[in-house]
Image: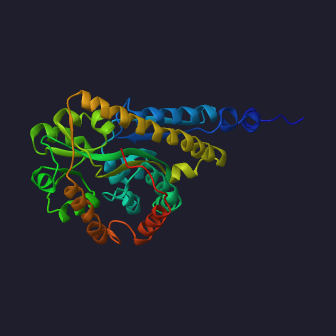
Amino acid sequence: MRRRSPFLLVLLLACLAAFCRPTPAAVAGDKYLFKIASLAPDGSVWAKRFQEFAREVTEKSHGDVTFKIYPGGVMGDDRAMYRKIRVGQLQGGGFTMTGISEVVPDFRVLGIPFLFNSYDEVDRAWATLWGPLQKAFANQGLKLVATTEVGFLYAMSARPITTLDGLRTAKSWIPEGDPISKTYFETLGITPTPLSIPDVLTSLQTGMIDTVFNSFYGAVVLQWFTRTRYITDIPFGYSYGALVLDGRAFNRLPPAYARLIEEAARHNFANLVNDTRQSNRDALEALRASGLTMVHATPEALTQLKAHRQQTVAKLVGTAFSKEIYQTLISGLAATPASRPAP
């Protein structure tokens, strides 16, 4: 009988073992890691709610979908985070409206000054724009998972501002790269100082600026309130952001895991909106307790400030955002029933 070569026998056994051994995916399931960065400070309501969202997704996927979170701007500002997504260093980010709108311009449309009178109108606007904005993000290779809220913005200053002339003499800050704020201030005859969010506190401390715009909670979390003394009692605008994932990473997920992320985001970030609004109410009391004074803008100032909104919009439609998204927004607001004033 012809003897088999020992080498061939070993090769045969190795091939048989490889064929019979379960693949890694069959043993432990495919693993999907999303590295997510954000400017939101660790410990803030935004960071806490994202952690709950991430925990839910990981638990329900039995550890197949996990998240590594980089809060507090440790991965840089919005522009730096987006660059890292494009090269695969990150798979997503929690972006400010200003930062991500450089990539998806239509996302900035809700940032028009004096656009909303209430949170009821804000909620109607989001319901109207969610579908079109998801498509706009998808066109840029991104997945819009959820929107986040900072809230209504108030002027916080070293000196009381109650008139338009008072605002004109202030050293005002606007977000770097925000054409809406820049254009609006230009219509008012004001030249503001554009800065990224991480640079604002230092600029307040050095006196480069003396007037900022933020929500009550945002001013507490970022410590801007420590360098201001007055709050003007009218909301200048509305601030928000987005949780965005790299479309390539999201599309690699099995359909069940993609649905899991969307469903977990839906209720966790709806809760975040409630968290943020309550935090703003609590923060207002804390700001008053710390010594900040609420001052009342004159009726003339409010009329003048609102009048410049339409001049601003006329310059921005078709450039800062599309005519289509603006018309969709206005149509949605027109269907909004009468609602209570913004806090």
- Front position in the image: 166 or 78: 166
Residue 118 image point, x, y percent: 40, 51
Q: Quarter-wise, where is residue 220 in the image? A: top left
- Say which of 38 and 31 sits in front: 38
Residue drawn where x is 57% and y is 33% of the image: 56
Q: Position of residue 44 (x, y in %)?
A: 38, 32
In the displayed orientation, state which residue is furthest to the front: 299
Residue 182 in the figure: left or right of residue 104: left
Hey, which quadrant is residue 219 in on the image? Answer: top left
Quadrant in the rendering for residue 182 = bottom left
Residue 51 at x, y = what percent?
48, 33
Relative height, residue 325 to residue 79 (above, below): below
- Compared with 40, 329 (above or below) is below
Can residue 74 be seen at all in this image of the molecule?
Answer: no
Q: Is residue 304 left or right of residue 106?
A: left
Numbered-mark total? 0
Picture coordinates of residue 108, whole percent (x, y): 37, 58
Q: Quadrant of the C terminus?
A: top left
251 with respect to 285 (left or right): right
Q: Residue sitting at 26 percent across and 69 percent down?
A: 311
Image side of residue 109 versus residue 200, left or right? right
